[in-house]
Every structure is written in C-alpha cells, then in structure tokens.
Amino acid sequence: MSIDINYSETRGPNVDDFISPHPTTSCFIPICLYSFMANRPFLYEYIPWAMSKCEQPRIIIGDYMERHNIMAFEGLPKAEAIAKAERRGHRVEKDIKAVLSDLDTNDDVRVESCRAVIETAEAQEIILAIRDYASKSECFNTDIEQQIALMLSNTKRLSRKDLRKINGADMLLLREYMIEEIAFFLALYQQGYTTEIYPGRDMKILQKMASARYRGFPFEFSERTHISVAVLLDSGTSYAQLDDSNGEGELKE
C-alpha cells in the first residue's frame, strides 16, 4: 500500500507549513465509519503515516453524527441509532489505540468521538447559527441540498430501490447531518485546529466557506487547510475503489 499527499486536491494557507520538516501540531484526522477508513488494515497503514507528518494530531471518530444517517437509511429510532453508531465507533477507536500503542505514542495523541466536539456549548451555538444562515442564504442552502444529493448518489449503504424510498422526513435527517458536520469543522477551527488530514477531496461547501464566497457568512474560516491523502494498493488500485463493493469495510454488526 502506498500513502502520500495528493497535491492536486490539497489546498489552504497552511500547506507549506504542513509539508515542512516541523509541521504544526494543530491538525486533526476525522475517521468516517461508513467508508474504507474504518478498515483495520487501512488504519494500520494510515495512522503511522499521519503520525509521521504531524506528531500530535487529534483523531476524531465520526460516530455520533452518524445517528442522523442511520435513522434515515435504516429507520431506527434515535436511541438505537446512537447506540449502533457508537458501537462501531468503539471498535474503530480500539483499532486506532492498538496502532498508537505499537508506535509508543498512545498517551500523546487524542482519540475521541465527534460527540466530544458536537455537544459543546460552542458547537451547539454554531449549529443554530448555520441553520439560521441557511434559512436566509439561498446560495448556501442550495449548496447544502446539492451536498446531500451528492452523498446519496455515491452511497453504498442503500440499494437504488431503497434510495427511491427516501422521504421528506429522511431528507430532514440528512440535512441535520450536513449542518452538524459543517458545525463540527467550524468548532474545531475555532479551537485552533485549522488543518485536516483526509483521504479524499474536500467538500465544495467547505471550500467556499474558506474562500469567503458566501455573503454575510457568520464565521471566519480563511485558514482552513485540507491535506488530501492518496491511497494506492500495490496493484495500482485505490483503496477506495477496492472497498466500494460494500462501503462498510470489515465492521459488521
């Protein structure tokens, strides 16, 4: 497996700092549960690579915010959706901590659920502000809807038949997920975590926020830096392509 920076999708004012011999420690690594990122073999390659680039990153598992998607896609009530998401999150956390233990850095790196960010008073205030702004900005609201549509078109979690069953209530849940995800990034940014390491492209809506393309947007986001990671197997196939067959990696209920 080969892991390296994908410079064509990497952007932001802190890129030069990140690739310098002594990069900033204010970087974070979000881990998506329903993607190849949750695979144990991938984590055992990815985490050491990320640690070689940023000595003390903040690793954040995107479990709690997945409750919205689980409720929409699987029809589970909120409490069950949270429990399911957190079970998956705990398994990923266990794998990550095992990797860090092998690297002898387990005590130096924060590994936590996104719930620790989302449930702060600051993040909750941001969520309210984003909802309010979306109700007033047609452009921002349209981009949220387009991001949801893109997620649905790319998801492997539902068949085409099941996708046709997504109703208005489900779409509201998916919207809440998107708003919460945006607030998550803004909350981390306000805490000083301006640089994200992620195997893939940055979301268009985040790029537009960073470049101040939304008139009257209530938050500063100009230092947002996205370090895109390219992952290739020895065969030349991307890890993402290999995993697209199920979209859930090794984690099974």
Image: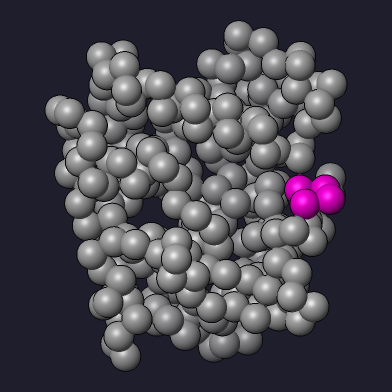
The quadrant the N terminus occupies is bottom right
| Residue range of the region highlighted in magenta in the rendering | 244-248
The C terminus lies in quadrant:
top right
Q: Quadrant of residue 168?
A: top right
Residue, far top: 168
Residue at the image position 53 percent from the left and 37 percent from the top: 65
Residue 59 in view = no
Q: Position of residue 116 (x, y in %)?
A: 43, 47
Q: What residue sits 65% from the left and 60% below the top?
A: 37
Quarter of the figure with residue 98: bottom right
Residue 2 place in picture, x, y as percent: 65, 81
Q: Is residue 239 left or right of residue 144?
A: right
**Residue at the (58%, 27%) spot, across then down:** 149
- What percent of the width, then of the height, locates residue 67? 61, 32
Q: Is residue 18 above or below residue 194?
A: below
Magenta span contains residue 65? no
Taking 132 as reference, is 157 above or below it?
below
